[in-house]
Image (cartoon, grey):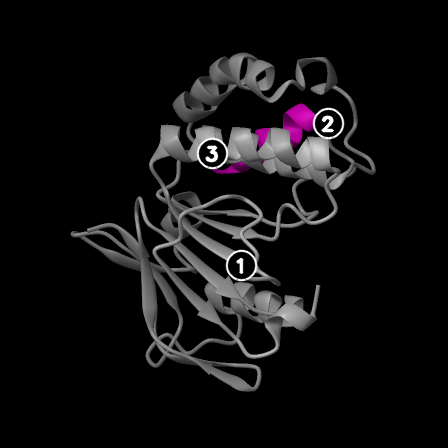
């Protein structure tokens, strides 16, 4: 069994029940943006007593939390407007997880795979441009490219569709769906609305009261 698991915890002023997302499963948490940020902080172990709460990555052989480097490789994030560092090129942004922590072999594999990946994302001509200020769509493409190279077991997605023009959203929805099929990952989708914008088949959903009022 491979999954992202969390114990019951206090998130700001609400209690979140224990739960999990298995690899290949899709789960949604509907909550205002402030609660999403609090959840992400808890997921990365900020201010969390792991003996009593927290978020963990588990396989049949091991359990790790956010302080373990394995966690950041097996649980990857696709966050709203947080895909790119402005001072790096798009190429460097996509390869970012491999630049400092990966083995030489993994870095070589990622560099070899990047041209075909960039063609799929339709950003080949932009790879060596400085990221600077980019749209929600480009941020999402960079994050998706990074995830395709990392090949995690679980991805955490935060309202990635917000701010995209309709035709960009249609294109990203297709790419995202294809990525999920290729990777076979589990998905934890954090959203401000219960509206199914991305067309995903969620196995279960947790909704905080009033979440749809905050977009």
Residue 67 visible (yes or no): yes
Secondary structure, mark 2, is loop
Q: Mark 1 and mark 2 in contact? Answer it, CB < 8 Å.
A: no
Mark 1: few, some, or many residues within 10 Å (few <14, many ≥20)?
A: many
What residue sits right under mark 1 in the picture?
190
Q: Looking at the image, which residue is at 34% across and 74% down?
A: 18
Secondary structure, mark 1, is strand
What residue sits right under mark 2 in the picture?
89
Reading the chain from its start, which is encountered first: label 3 or label 2? Answer: 2
User: What whole-number distance in Å separates the C-alpha atoms at marks 3 and 2?
Assistant: 26 Å
Quarter of the image for residue 214 reads bottom right
Q: Residue furthest bottom?
A: 13
Mark number displayed over residue 177: 3
User: What whole-number distance in Å separates the C-alpha atoms at marks 3 and 1?
Assistant: 17 Å
Q: Position of residue 52 (x, y in %)?
A: 34, 81
Q: Looking at the image, which residue is at 61% across and 53% down?
A: 159
Magenta span: predominant SS is helix
Reading the chain from its start, which is encountered first: label 1 or label 2? Answer: 2
Q: Position of residue 51 (x, y in %)?
A: 33, 78
């Amino acid at each position: 069994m491979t999954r992202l698991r969390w114990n019951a915890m206090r998130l700001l002023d609400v209690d979140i029940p224990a739960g999990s997302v298995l690899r290949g499963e899709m789960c949604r948490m509907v909550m205002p943006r402030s609660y999403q940020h609090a959840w992400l902080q808890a997921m990365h172990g900020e201010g969390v007593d792991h003996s009593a709460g927290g978020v963990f990555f588990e396989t049949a052989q091991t359990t790790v939390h956010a302080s373990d480097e394995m966690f950041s490789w097996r649980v990857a994030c696709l966050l709203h407007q947080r895909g790119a560092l402005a001072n790096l090129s798009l190429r460097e942004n996509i390869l970012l997880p491999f630049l400092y922590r990966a083995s030489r072999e993994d870095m070589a594999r990622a560099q070899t795979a990047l041209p075909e990946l960039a063609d799929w994302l339709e950003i080949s001509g932009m790879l060596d441009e400085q990221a600077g200020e980019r749209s929600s769509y480009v941020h999402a493409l960079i994050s998706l490219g990074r995830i395709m190279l990392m090949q995690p077991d679980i991805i955490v997605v935060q309202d990635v569709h917000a701010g995209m023009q309709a035709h960009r959203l249609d294109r990203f929805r297709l790419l995202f769906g294809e990525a999920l099929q290729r990777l076979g990952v589990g998905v934890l989708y954090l959203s401000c609305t219960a509206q199914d914008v991305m067309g995903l088949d969620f196995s279960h959903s947790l909704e905080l009261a009033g979440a749809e009022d905050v977009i």
